[in-house]
Image (cartoon, grey):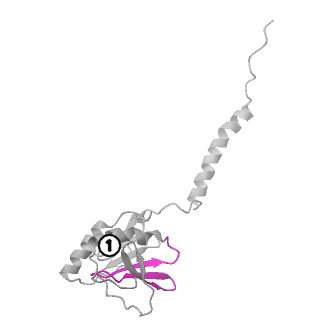
């Protein structure tokens, strides 16, 4: 006599459980994501409001340098998507939320004699720490640049700006001796 090799069929309860489990898992993940459970997901810059930026009238030579710099800026910057600015897109750029804002052709900074200057990737910067932000200003360029960075922002942005700055904005001769 041959052995019975047929398996018993799963019951309706087992079938319902096996089909409901993946659906519940997917629904839970969607709810977690929808409630902000994945905080590192980037926001779509098209859905964000334009970033306020000043756009003073620039001399023709300064405007030329600023347009060249803005054209060379990366997108994204250190993982931050580029955003619209309210004015002067030929001299201003913004990235991320909260925004990091670069201004080109700004007034030369007033630097205290005892200020600590930082040379990063061939650009000399003066950092001005404020309560809600750090304002970084170049001190070795023919056209002054300012980058406003909110507290707590990722620091990779400054190094990522250096290559386009070096390529587009001529250095002063000689640059600061203590940078």
Residue 16, picture quadrant? top right
Measured along the vertical axis of the image, is residue 54 above or below residue 4? below
Q: Is residue 72 left or right of residue 94?
A: left
Q: Quadrant of the N terminus?
A: top right
Q: Position of residue 112 (x, y in %)?
A: 42, 93
Residue ranking furthest to the top = 1
Q: Position of residue 44 (x, y in %)?
A: 43, 62
Residue 106, picture quadrant? bottom left
The residue under the point 56% across, 63% down is: 39
Residue ranking furthest to the right = 1
The residue under the point 33% across, 67% down is: 73
| Viewer-side residue, 111 vs 152 | 111
Q: Quadrant of the C terminus?
A: bottom left
The residue under the point 47% across, 73% down is: 98
| Viewer-side residue, 61 vs 82 | 61
- Mark 1 highlights which residue? 165
The residue under the point 33% across, 76% down is: 86
The residue stretch that appears in magenta:
127-154
């Amino acid at each position: 006599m041959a052995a019975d090799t047929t398996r018993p069929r799963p019951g309706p309860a087992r079938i319902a459980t096996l089909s409901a489990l993946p659906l519940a898992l997917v629904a839970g993940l969607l709810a977690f994501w929808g409630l902000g459970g994945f905080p590192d997901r980037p926001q779509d810059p098209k859905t964000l409001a334009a970033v306020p930026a000043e756009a003073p009238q620039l001399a023709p030579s300064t405007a030329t340098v600023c347009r060249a710099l803005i054209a060379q800026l990366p997108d994204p910057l250190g993982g931050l998507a580029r955003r619209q600015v309210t004015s002067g897109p030929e001299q201003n750029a913004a990235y991320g939320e909260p925004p990091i804002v670069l201004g080109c052709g700004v007034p030369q900074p007033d630097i205290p004699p005892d200020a600590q200057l930082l040379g990063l990737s061939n650009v000399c910067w003066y950092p001005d720490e404020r309560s809600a932000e750090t304002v970084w200003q170049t001190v070795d360029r023919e056209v002054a640049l300012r980058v406003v960075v909110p507290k707590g922002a990722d620091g990779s942005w400054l190094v990522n700006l250096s290559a386009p700055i070096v390529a587009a904005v001529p250095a002063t001769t000689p640059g600061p001796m203590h940078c």
